[in-house]
Amino acid sequence: MRECPKNYLRFLVDLNIKMMNFYNETSLACSKLITNAYSTSFSMGIKAFDKALHEPIYAIYGFVRYADEIVDTFHDYDKQALITRFKADTFQAIEEGISLNPVLQSFQWVVNQYHIEHAFISAFFDSMEMDLYKTKFTQEEYETYIYGSAEVIGLMCLRVFCAENRAEFDVLAPFAKRLGSAFQKINFLRDIASDFEERGRVYFPDVRFEAFSEVEKQAIEQDIAQEFADGLEGIKNLPEGCKKGVYLAYVYYTQLFEKIKQTPASVLRTTRIRVSDAKKIWLMAQSLVKVKFNTLS
């Protein structure tokens, strides 16, 4: 039997590498498409990152966005079965380093490339599953849900931002958690009407939607304000490659928070507060100037 020429074997190896790179590129393109389609504000923040950070952050967002869709959108299907399968497929993809699902292919790449803790992913799925059956939350359940649905996503992104610098990650992790928690609580306030009307759900402990009061709203806002203050201190010490993008997200949520604070609790029960796209663009320009001149506030 004749042996294959070495140059032909080299050609096959190179071709395989080329095709795998193409598969990874198209998978990451899917994650980018999902991000741009679902969140203009998050997409703007990613564009402010150094280019090397774009693909891994798109991969994280595409993954968490689709998992969230399972529990909040697919009402005509067995959502428990779907999220259980998606979770199993996720960890299988991470273990094997490959998936036929482009979203999971992107996500397993970033998890393995940046050594993202599997415990973060498990906590995320725990929170997603809580959305399948929880409509009221105790304080402990509320904190657990926020950790898994928001704080760990910030920690996943921080792993990417810090790359191999584990000491830097350890210093910044508490601030990332506080910022993620503040963002999520603002989401809860913004969506309090739709969460209750569409899902019968209220995330805030001991809050009855029909009786949501100014006193309760102000207590939540005080909590958010403190977390924002802590989060800003962390942003100031982030690596330069990601600081602009994270600060832009902070400024956007600050603007949304100010609008919510000016809105009576009775109006929040009927109206979803938002920041216009034109305002987002203005905030982005303002944020880039502040980061450039190191005047973050």
Image: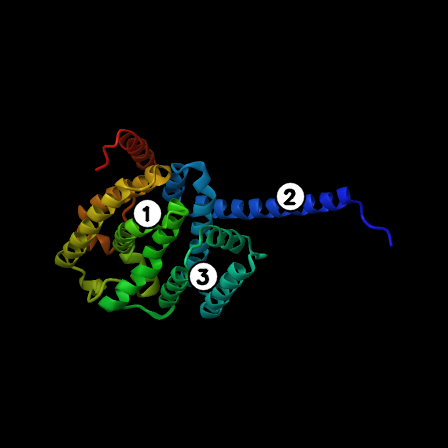
Q: Nearer the viewer, residue 294 or 103?
A: 294
Q: Are marks 3 and 1 in contact (CB under 8 Å)?
A: no
- Residue beneath the point at 44% across and 65% down: 75
Quarter-of-image position of residue 211? bottom left
Label 1: element kind:
helix
- Residue beneath the point at 47% across and 48% down: 34
Q: Which mark is residue 106?
A: none
Q: Amino acid at mark 3?
A: Ile
Residue 275 locus on image (x, y percent): 29, 42
Q: Earlier in the sequence, mark 2 or mark 1?
A: 2
Label 2: element kind:
helix
Q: Nearer the viewer, residue 215 or 177?
A: 177
Residue 181 locus on image (x, y percent): 27, 54
Q: Which residue is mark 1?
A: 168
Residue 128 locus on image (x, y percent): 39, 63
Q: Which residue is mark 3?
A: 70
Q: Nearer the viewer, residue 85 or 96?
A: 96
Q: Which residue is mark 2?
A: 18
Task: Determine whether, in the image, residue 231 is placed left or right of residue 72.
Answer: left
